[in-house]
Image (spheres, coloured by chain):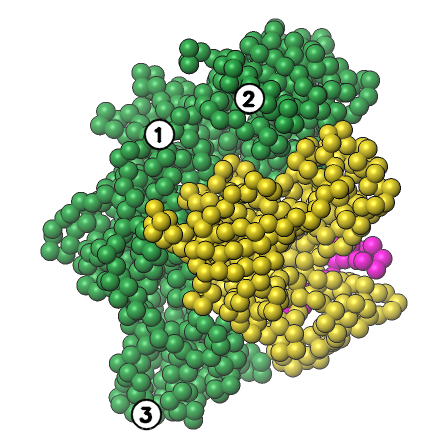
């Protein structure tokens, strides 16, 4: 009895729906055409009374599929929020009456539109199941942290304070990381006037004093498998002994390596011992332990020049193209090491843009000025060892002339290079080309430059051992609003491996990463999806007997969620899955589905649309719109009463990457005259939160020409667009353009 | 309101901009009970008024849509709009908080059909458009507004407009008798995310914002690019409505200056670089952008955006703090006076339009916090143990860009979780 599908269709007459549409006819359509079991109209469906009517049917009539035919799925979500049933929405307000003129001529086509949306909502409900979630009873809440520097230790301490057990795996023999070699740090508290204690000793004490934190020194990860809630990690020590432990989430705080200053001979590094990097100067200061800093040959230092952006912000080969963010403040801090000792020591910071942001940054800069640190806008070209010291040759950008400054010591502000392990995307690309065969493989191989790098995480994922890199080797998120949006669910990077940063930012970042790890653990325990489809309880399953082992799903999953089992069938790791449906879109034999999103939930909708015969001159356009950008854009167009063609039927999709070609061929075969696909921006600045969904859809659609040809259809009948959420005018226009195209080239011959 | 349930395991988040939304959603997605209060009728904050983000040039409403979906789906999170915190007392794990909710005059029956707005005549400056356009006395704050529910401006209450609005509503959603409400709750920890406001440009007298029509602020410039904004997505001069093609951007307008804000507001350099791309987007090679700057602070890996803009021949960089702006009465052109410090050249350069890269000032003045918190000279909340379980997030902690504000808000959410977990541990 519980398994019996009982569909309730509820048709709202409010907001003008009842005035503009024949809702009795809509009810009839729901019952007769779409086979809803219970059909009711209501003059104000989202009212307490309307909602109660539906809830009563769920409670008393056994309705377990609810089709709300009212406003957009984005509206009134608080009212239409029923537990344990599948809910679909027929968009009669934003999707129909708000985008159609209220005229006699338009009435019939507007009603047709509404009829179809009712049919679609009911049939979608029929093919959905309320997701049950995957209650993972075996999960572990412990958190694995890779790297024992400031970022890693902070993440551990903060997660432990929230009650979670943590293990730190540190490659070296001691905690502390890069900061352990520093004398002081940039101040993190008002008045931001003086360098302050690094806080490393305190942090190490907090780690060692916590009964919730275990530390593995001289250890690395040699194999990591599993998924959020059930990661299994082999922790191997230098001596070769390996222990295997289970974790719920992973934080990668593998830090940075200082840029190799040997690549900067023009700046005197390696030629004079008195040309040092910032890290070396800090080590010297630590060694001096508050005493005066001397040159390498033991002489007093009377003048120091700090060369900013040494090998950074430069397009020169071998240099870093980016800014490392902390170096301006670090140089000010280091100039103070001298000034605080002896105000007569000359300290000159030669910079192109002094970058001391925020309240603390600017205060610290001013403090440096007060202490007599000199700042010169200039471009250093060369550092040469002279008779009695060093000569810094630079272009003074204010006086617009070449200048020379003598110095006893020169400090190079070299940048941070991320310790991000293996660049998996380069590797994976090659592999795919190989497997698909064809003539392109050789070309791809030439591009491949393999520099042996130790993996940080040693993931046994199908898609490679480390996290994908975003840019310049950093494992950052691609999204401004979501700095922790990771491409491997439950694994978060933090600190300078994610993005160049100073210690204060690293501490904030690590605290945030600790929250995300905790969240991943809690989500995994309940079978909930992580961002951006937070809370989604559905997950993909596949029909093994139909699978041809083509591996498209395992290759194309943007999150590396699918491995292959021993028999080379796809092995879904639900907790890694983000529910985008890219695998479903990729599957040529259509064996992959979600409980609430499948080839049928969309395919049956497009099939139930009434296709008038050729002579009625009512074409049909199918629009598949990304639910995050294009669909809201159409909603907002409706709020502005932007009109668009009555011939379109819009279906929101999780991602354009989930669009299976069968939907396109089914639509064409059943007589649609055009198909419009709307996804996010693709390419380098891609907007797709499922990474390559839009790009893959464009790619796949570029290959449907053959299908079109076999059906003797014009290629213009399918268009694929990148649509932003702000395209409130453009999205309707794209639909109208398709309507115009059809008017030009004529109706599809495939109408029955 | 009567059904708000809060305990000392509840986290209160104050402010529904991107930082507050982030803190609230992240904590709720960890399974914590959260109350999010927002002073305005809708969440979204300042980022919802931006056209694009740097450096990706993507649209803030995309992220807002995702966050709204997360918020709608989460049963642990309770949102209260038009609500402010008036009193806070107590200690970590046990704060007593008084919330004051202003009357919206529209209840949850509202379907956002818009019938009320159609019949109301009174118009007021649009807050969403920084007063560059008008909105009705019954209004939806913006197209993305959540809750998607209309608001009656209190200024129409008692006027015939209010009665007309009420009569136009078929759903009994308008309640003209709605009163201010006050509630006292117990919460365990507080995330303070009240954000920032643009520095008052009138205070920078040499730049003549109050006198010269064609001197505007960077936040107003953002609204101009909105296709549904006050100028329909065109860059128009306020003085004569002509297209502004030669645009000057003045950096550190109010920032890094002891007379105004002594801190660096961090976002303005990248924001102006981004805005030069708007000029290109509209006019291609015909447009002209001039950036008057002290230092270009395109910090860390996004420095490549600066390099890209530098390569654009329509963009010129002038290292100079502009001394003053005068108006050419005949043309309406603002004329910039100052010295280009690279080579020390004096200039007096006219432009079509001047955009002040306006500084970021904390929204809540130092003396106005309902409980004693440690605030630095710049007005930002310091991270200080003396603050107990009150944690600043986003721009109430420092001048931050969106990415860093979200990072900081996520960290603050964890700090709040630590407190309520401790409460749960000791009580459970």
User: Residue B83 or B15: which is nearer the viewer?
Assistant: B83
Q: Single out the mark in the foreground, 1 or 2.
A: 2
Q: Position of residue A218 (x, y in %)?
A: 18, 59
Q: Do the residues at pointers 1 and 2 share their chain?
A: yes
| Mark linked to residue A134 | 1
Query: Can residue A185 be seen from the camera position used here?
Result: yes
Vertical relation: B78 (above or below) B398: above
Of the image marks 2 and 3, the number of the one nearer the N terminus: 2
Q: Outermost residue toward the right?
A: B330
Q: Circle 2 sits on which residue?
A: A55
- Answer yes or no: do the residues labelled 3 and 1 have beta carbons within 8 Å? no
| Mark linked to residue A300 | 3
Q: Position of residue A586 (x, y in %)?
A: 42, 27
- Figure quadrant of the N terminus of chain A: top left
Colour-to-chain, green:
A
User: Residue A478 or A126: which is nearer the viewer?
Assistant: A126
Q: Circle 3 — which element?
A: loop
Q: Which residues are magenta?
A: B232-252
């Amino acid at each position: 009895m519980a398994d019996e599908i009982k569909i309730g269709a509820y048709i709202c007459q409010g907001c003008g729906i009842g005035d503009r549409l024949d809702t009795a006819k809509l009810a009839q359509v729901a019952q007769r055409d779409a086979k809803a079991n219970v059909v009711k109209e209501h003059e104000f469906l989202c009212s307490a009374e309307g909602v109660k009517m539906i809830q009563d049917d769920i409670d008393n009539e056994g309705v377990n599929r609810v089709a709300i035919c009212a406003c957009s799925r984005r509206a009134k979500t608080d009212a239409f929020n029923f537990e344990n049933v599948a809910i679909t929405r027929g968009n009669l307000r934003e999707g129909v009456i708000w985008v159609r003129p209220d005229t006699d001529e338009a009435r019939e086509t507007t009603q047709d539109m509404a009829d179809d949306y009712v049919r679609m909502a009911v049939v979608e409900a029929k093919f959905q199941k309320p997701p049950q979630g995957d209650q993972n009873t075996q999960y572990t809440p412990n958190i694995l942290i890779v790297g024992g520097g400031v970022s890693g230790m902070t993440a551990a301490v903060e997660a432990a304070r929230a009650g979670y057990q943590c293990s730190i795996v540190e490659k070296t023999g001691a905690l502390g990381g890069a900061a352990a070699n520093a004398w002081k740090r940039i101040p993190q508290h008002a008045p931001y006037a003086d360098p302050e204690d690094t806080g490393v000793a305190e942090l190490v004490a907090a780690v060692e004093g916590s009964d919730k934190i275990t530390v593995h020194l001289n250890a690395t990860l040699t194999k990591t498998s599993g998924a959020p809630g059930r990661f299994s990690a082999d922790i191997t020590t230098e001596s070769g002994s390996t222990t295997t432990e289970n974790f719920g989430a992973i934080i990668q705080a593998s830090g940075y390596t200082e840029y190799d200053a040997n690549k900067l001979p023009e700046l005197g590094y390696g030629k004079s011992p008195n040309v040092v990097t910032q890290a070396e100067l800090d080590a010297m200061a630590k060694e001096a332990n508050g005493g005066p800093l001397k040159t390498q040959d033991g002489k007093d230092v009377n003048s120091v020049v700090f060369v900013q952006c040494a090998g950074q912000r430069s397009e020169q080969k071998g240099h870093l193209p980016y800014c490392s963010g902390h170096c301006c403040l670090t140089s000010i801090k280091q100039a103070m090491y001298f000034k605080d000792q002896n105000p007569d020591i000359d300290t000159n910071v030669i910079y192109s843009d002094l970058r001391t942001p925020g309240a603390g940054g600017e205060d610290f800069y001013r403090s440096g000025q007060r202490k007599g640190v000199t700042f010169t806008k200039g471009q250093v070209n060369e550092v040469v060892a002279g008779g009695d010291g060093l000569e810094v040759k630079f272009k003074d950008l204010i006086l617009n002339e070449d200048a020379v400054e003598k110095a006893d010591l020169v400090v190079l502000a070299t940048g941070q290079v991320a310790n991000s392990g293996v660049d998996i995307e380069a590797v994976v690309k090659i592999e795919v080309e190989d497997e698909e065969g064809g003539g392109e493989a050789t070309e791809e191989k030439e591009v491949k430059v393999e520099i042996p790098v130790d993996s940080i995480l040693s993931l046994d994922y199908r898609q490679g051992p480390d996290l994908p890199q975003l840019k310049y080797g950093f494992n950052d998120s691609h999204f401004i609003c979501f700095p922790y949006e990771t491409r491997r669910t439950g694994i978060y990077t933090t600190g300078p491996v994610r993005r160049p940063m100073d210690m204060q930012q690293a501490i904030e970042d690590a605290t945030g990463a600790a929250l995300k790890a905790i969240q991943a653990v809690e989500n995994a325990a309940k079978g909930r999806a992580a961002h951006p489809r937070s809370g989604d309880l559905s997950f993909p399953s596949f029909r093994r007997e139909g699978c041809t082992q083509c591996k498209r799903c395992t290759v194309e999953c943007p999150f590396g969620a699918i491995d292959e089992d021993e028999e080379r069938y796809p092995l879904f790791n639900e907790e890694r899955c983000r529910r985008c449906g890219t695998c479903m879109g990729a599957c040529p034999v259509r064996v992959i589905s979600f409980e609430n999103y499948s080839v049928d939930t969309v395919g049956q909708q497009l099939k139930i649309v009434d296709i008038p015969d050729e002579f009625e001159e009512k074409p049909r356009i199918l629009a598949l719109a990304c639910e995050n950008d294009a669909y809201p854009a159409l909603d907002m167009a409706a709020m502005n009463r932007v009109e668009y063609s009555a011939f379109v039927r819009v279906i929101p999709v999780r991602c354009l990457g989930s669009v299976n070609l069968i939907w396109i061929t089914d639509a064409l075969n059943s007589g649609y005259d055009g198909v419009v696909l709307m996804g996010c921006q693709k390419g380098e600045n891609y907007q797709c939160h499922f990474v390559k969904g839009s790009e893959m859809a464009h790619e796949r659609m570029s290959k449907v020409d053959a299908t079109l040809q076999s059906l003797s259809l014009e290629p213009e009948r399918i268009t694929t667009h990148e649509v932003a959420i702000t395209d409130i005018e453009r999205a309707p226009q794209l639909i109208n353009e398709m309507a115009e195209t059809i008017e030009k080239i004529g109706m599809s011959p495939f109408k029955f | 309101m009567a059904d708000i349930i809060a305990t000392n395991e509840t986290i209160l988040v104050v402010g529904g901009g991107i930082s507050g939304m982030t803190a609230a959603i992240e904590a709720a997605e960890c399974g914590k009970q959260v109350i999010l209060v927002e002073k305005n009728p809708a969440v979204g904050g300042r980022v919802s008024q931006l056209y694009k983000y740097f450096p990706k040039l993507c649209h803030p409403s995309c992220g807002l849509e995702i966050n709204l979906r997360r918020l709608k789906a989460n049963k642990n999170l309770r949102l209260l709009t038009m609500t402010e915190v008036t009193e806070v007392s107590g200690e970590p794990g046990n704060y007593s908080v008084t919330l004051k909710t202003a009357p919206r005059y529209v209840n949850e029956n509202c379907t956002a059909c818009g019938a009320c707005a159609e019949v109301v005549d009174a118009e007021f400056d649009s807050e969403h458009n920084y007063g560059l356009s008008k909105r009705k006395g019954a209004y939806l704050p913006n197209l993305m507004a959540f809750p998607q529910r209309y608001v009656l401006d209190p200024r129409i209450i008692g006027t015939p407009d209010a009665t007309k609005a009420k009569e136009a509503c078929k759903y009994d959603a308008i309640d003209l008798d709605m009163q201010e409400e006050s509630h006292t709750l117990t919460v365990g920890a507080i995330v303070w995310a009240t954000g920032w406001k643009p520095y008052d440009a009138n205070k920078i007298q040499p730049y003549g914002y109050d006198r010269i029509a064609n001197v505007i602020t960077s936040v107003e410039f953002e609204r101009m690019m909105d296709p549904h904004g006050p100028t329909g997505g065109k860059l128009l001069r306020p003085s004569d409505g002509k297209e502004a093609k030669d645009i000057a951007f003045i950096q550190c307008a109010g920032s890094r200056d002891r007379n105004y804000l002594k801190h660096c507001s961090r976002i303005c350099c990248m924001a102006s670089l981004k805005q030069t791309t708007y000029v290109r987007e509209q006019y291609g090679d015909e447009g002209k952008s001039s950036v008057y700057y002290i230092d270009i602070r395109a910090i860390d890996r996004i420095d490549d955006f600066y390099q890209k803009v530098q390569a654009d021949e329509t963009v010129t960089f002038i290292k100079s703090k502009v001394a003053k702006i005068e108006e050419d009465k005949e043309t309406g052109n603002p004329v910039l006076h100052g010295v280009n410090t690279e080579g020390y050249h004096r200039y007096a350069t006219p432009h079509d339009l001047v955009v002040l890269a306006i500084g970021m000032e904390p929204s809540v003045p130092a003396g106005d916090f309902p409980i004693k918190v440690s605030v630095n000279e710049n007005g930002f909340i310091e991270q200080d143990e003396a603050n107990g379980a009150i944690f600043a997030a986003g721009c109430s902690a420092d001048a931050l860009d969106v990415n860093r504000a979200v990072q900081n808000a996520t960290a603050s959410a964890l700090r709040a979780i630590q407190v309520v977990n401790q409460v749960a541990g000791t009580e459970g």
